[in-house]
Amino acid sequence: QVQLVESGGGLVQPGGSLRLSCDASGRLLGFNAMNWYRQAPGKQRELVARITRGSSTTYADSVKGRFTISRETSKNTVYLQMDSLKPGDTAVYYCNAEGTYSEVWGQGIQVTVSS
């Protein structure tokens, strides 16, 4: 069973940047896609960014042009580069591995954007 561990979160000022990492204990190539979700207090979890096995990427409208998802297959790691951060980006961010019949979630990591 693959396990996912997120890192790189923390407190950042508006306009700043953070890079989240999602390290997998096993190979990611068997999954259809890798996703980053986020959940803010009192809100539903939402899909932020997605990268498919074929390296196609999609983004939520709210983060287009500011966030970039990428994958380093040799390291079984997925990244989320977050630039021009806004207070509205404050949330717990989750890494997700999407398979045909199952999925795996990381434990989540806090990102706080505040001055």
Image: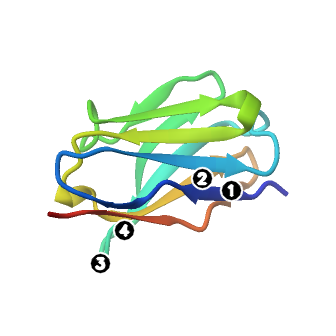
Q: Count neighbours of disc 4 (C-alpha within 10 A) and say few if under 14, some if 14 to 19, many if 20 or more.
A: few
* Horizontal side of residue 33 vs 27, given as left or right: left
Residue in front for this viewpoint, 69 or 42: 69
Q: Which quadrant of the view contains residue 39?
A: bottom left
C-alpha gap between disc 2 and disc 1:
8 Å
Q: For numbered disc 4, what is the local secondary structure? A: loop
Up the image or down, 73 lies above or below 98; here it is: above
Residue found at x 52% / y 23%? 56
x and y, in percent, of residue 98 in the image: 65, 47
* Horizontal side of residue 8 vs 18, given as left or right: right
Up the image or down, 61 lies above or below 74; here it is: below
If you read the primary sequence from the N terminus, does the residue marked by circle 1 or circle 4 appear first? 1
Report the mark closest to the observer, 2 or 1: 1
Numbered tag placed on residue 4 in the rendering: 1
x and y, in percent, of residue 72 in the image: 65, 30
C-alpha gap between disc 4 and disc 2:
16 Å
* Horizontal side of residue 87 vs 75, given as left or right: left
Residue found at x 82% / y 46%? 26
Residue found at x 19% / y 52%? 86
Q: Residue furthest bottom?
A: 42
Which amino acid lies under the numbered mark 1 shown in the image of this protein? Leu
x and y, in percent, of residue 103 in the image: 69, 55
Numbered tag placed on residue 44 in the rendering: 4
Q: For numbered disc 2, what is the local secondary structure? A: strand
Quarter in which the N terminus is drawn:
bottom right
If you read the primary sequence from the N terminus, does the residue marked by circle 1 or circle 3 appear first? 1
If you read the primary sequence from the N terminus, does the residue marked by circle 4 or circle 2 appear first? 4
Determine contact: label 2, label 1, CB under 8 Å.
yes
Q: For numbered disc 1, what is the local secondary structure? A: strand
